[in-house]
Image (tube, rainbow, N blue to C red):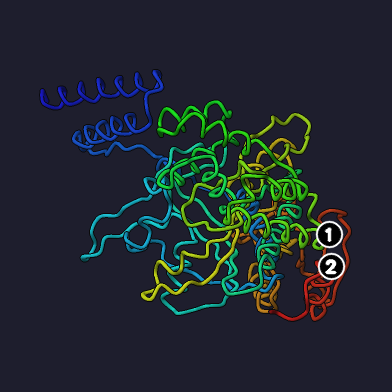
Amino acid sequence: MADRAALEELVRLQGEHVRGLKQQQAPAEQIEEEVTKLLKLKAQLGHDEGKQKFVLKTPKGTRDYSPRQMAVREKVFDVIIRCFKRHGAEVIDTPVFELKETLTGKYGEDSKLIYDLKDQGGELLSLRYDLTVPFARYLAMNKLTNIKRYHIAKVYRRDNPAMTRGRYREFYQCDFDIAGQFDPMIPDAECLKIMCEILSSLQIGNFLVKVNDRRILDGMFAVCGVPDSKFRTICSSVDKLDKVSWEEVKNEMVVEKGLAAEAADRIGEYVQQHGGVSLVEQLLQDPKLSQNKQALEGLGDLKLLFEYLTLFGIDDKVSFDLSLARGLDYYTGVIYEAVLLQMPPQAGEEPLGVGSVAAGGRYDGLVGMFDPKGRKVPCVGLSIGVERIFSIVEHRLEALEEKVRTTETQVLVASAQKKLLEERLKLVSELWDAGIKAELLYKKNPKLLNQLQYCEEAGIPLVAIIGEQELKDGVIKLRSVASREEVDVRREDLVEEIRRRTNQPLSIS
């Protein structure tokens, strides 16, 4: 018992140490390390009086989803998938983990966020960080040079989660990509059109899509005096301008990354500009930038892109923003990111800051990194930030106290008297076989009032009531839950009447 008492004291002290670190707002990595030590000490305590002590919680950066939350998620997914299919996309799937070497060196500074797995059967594996690199591997492995695909699946990042802002360690991505050799900017414009269609359909508020081009950025860095070896790391600093001030970004460039202050100042003159096609025209005349071949190509393509965006009717939702950098290493051309301008004003609702809600760009060199012969397959795509969108929709529904149906049941099979369970079972089976979404209560003799109350609580629109008289007459009493109106329907006509009232197609697809 003395040993156990000593162990319990160690657990207590370690627990106090962890709480102290949290109060001091110590680095997350340090806190996580000390929490791990605490859990190991608790594990050593083992069983106490036949009961195992453990904490019921989801792992850090993950969450469970209730039926109500899942109903909201399914509706959002449905909007996204219908849009992807409307634009002719096929669907694929890839493994949740990849060979570690597949993911290594593709994400720049974000590579530190990849989850590595222990050696399994002689293979070093990592959980996928996004859906783009696995897609590029899929294209190279199957020797595909032309496909329009979408992929909706979970990805994993060893990040510091911010759950209230829709930032998790396990989350869904919804990707749409066009692979193939096509004329410039036509697929790119369609990706931006898709992004605008989805965000408009979801009605999450006003948004703006920022666009830039990696070639313009690289050309800008070159004319500002950034050494080639620092392009990517300076690009990563510029990408933070949507979250922190220019002064902080400049300080990171100069103090932390060793860039000359004069070069940083020259970058500052460019990256604080944004506008439309007129800014593209202005930069095409810029005495320094116009002399850089890469920048000139990027600006020429952006001018063409804005022409197509005007034809698609979305040019008013797109802004050329020189501060947009997108930190990932694999982008080669046009890049874009959609941000909410403001939350939709709802009574009693706090503003919710969620960052970008969609992003993407062109990555023409990624497939070639996997191809043995280095053959390139030009690609452009987008990803919808569904977790952040879910956070917005959930907050809005909670503020409005809006009821969300968690089932799609169309009719409850009920009885008005006792000893009619067999008849209820026969009828509900008939409805299921006909493709009707139906339920019954799992009691032999439920009270009619309880059955009707269940319908109101679950949002079920219709009740098919069986009674002794109805059985004799060969009819079913069909009741509308909302209006409480009842009508006798011949049993052979019941399926058709339910379909008519719920607007369900006659055939089962």
- Is 66 positioned to the left or the right of 366 in the image? right
Q: Could you say where residue 433 lies in the image, as x and y percent from the top left?
A: 66, 79
Q: Is residue 335 above or below residue 474?
A: above
Q: Nearer the viewer, residue 339 or 250?
A: 250
Position of residue 162 relative to residue 315, above or below, is: above
Q: Earlier in the sequence, mark 1 or mark 2?
A: 1
- Residue 410: which quarter of the image? bottom right
**Residue at point 16% right, 23% down?**
5
Identify residue type, mark 1: Ser
Disc 1: which residue: 480
The local secondary structure at tag 2 comes to helix
Q: Which residue is mark 2?
A: 501
Residue 278, how many percent across, how many down? 78, 47
Q: Which mark is residue 219?
A: none
Secondary structure found at label 1? strand
Question: Which residue lies at the image location 55% right of the left edge and 26% below the top edge?
Answer: 247
Q: Are marks 1 and 2 in contact (CB under 8 Å)?
A: yes
How packed is label 1: few (under 14 Cα within 10 Å), some, or many (20 or more)? Answer: some
Residue 419 visible in the snapshot: no
